[in-house]
Amino acid sequence: MNVMFDTNVFSNLASGKIDSTSVPEDWRCVAIYLQWQEIQATKNPEIRSKIESVFDEHLPVKAPPIAVWDVTPFDESVWAEPGNLYQSILEEMDRLKPHRNNRVDAVIAEACVRGKMALVTNDHTLGQAAAAHGVLVFNLQK
């Protein structure tokens, strides 16, 4: 099954909050540019290195995000198709819990919808908004 890990999953695997044995072997990890960008924004170099190691361990297949102004690099993105759910996902997230990172998380959820992938996240707001748009959501944190 193709699954997209939210950045918090890579972080929580690195810190031990999620046991690596809880990741099923038949999951094929997919990521968009934004997860790597968020990992690189980790200020503590030691923690960032651990998260990068977890990211590399799962060798995610790279998928393109949709182009969103001030969120995704256009040279690594695809243009949204008519009927795209990004705005609807973002509105749902903002309704549930306004947060400055909702635009990034909505891009991740939209990539799951478009790519017919499950989402693995510990973010309740993202998970709830993604599930409301037909995404199968898993939370591996105990």
Image (tube, grey):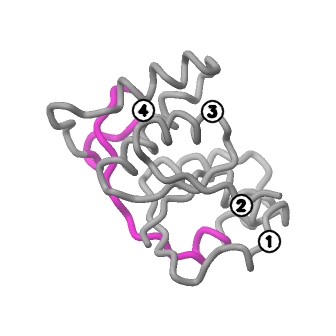
Q: Residues within 10 Å of mark 3 (few under 14, many from 20)?
A: many
* Mark toward the viewer: 4 or 1: 1
Place of residue 131 in the rendered image (x, y in percent of width and height, measured from the top left): 50, 42
Q: Is residue 131 left or right of residue 140?
A: left
Q: Which residue is mark 1?
A: 19
**Residue at screen point 77% across, 65% down:** 14
Marks 4,1: beta carbons within 8 A: no
Query: Is 18 placed above or below 125 here?
Result: below
Say left or right for 76 vs 132.
left
Q: Amino acid at mark 2?
A: Leu
Q: Amino acid at mark 4?
A: Val
- In the displayed structure, would residue 28 be above or below residue 100? below
Residue most extreme to the bottom: 25
State the separation of the CA atoms marked 4 and 1. 31 Å
**Label 1 – label 2 distance at C-alpha:** 8 Å
Which residue is identified by label 2? 140
Point out the tag, 4 or 1, that comes first from the N-terminus. 1
Q: Give the SS element for disc 1.
A: loop
Q: Earlier in the sequence, mark 4 or mark 2?
A: 4
- Name the spot of residue 109 as percent of width and height, x first: 45, 43
Residue 101, placed above or below residue 131? above
Residue picked out by circle 4: 71
Give the residue type at disc 1. Asp
Kindly report the distance in space between the C-alpha atoms of the residues bearing marks 4 and 2: 27 Å
**In the depicted view, which residue is nearer to us: 20 or 37?**
20
Q: Label 3 belongs to which residue?
A: 125
Instruction: Specify the quadrant of the image occupied by residue 61.
Output: bottom left
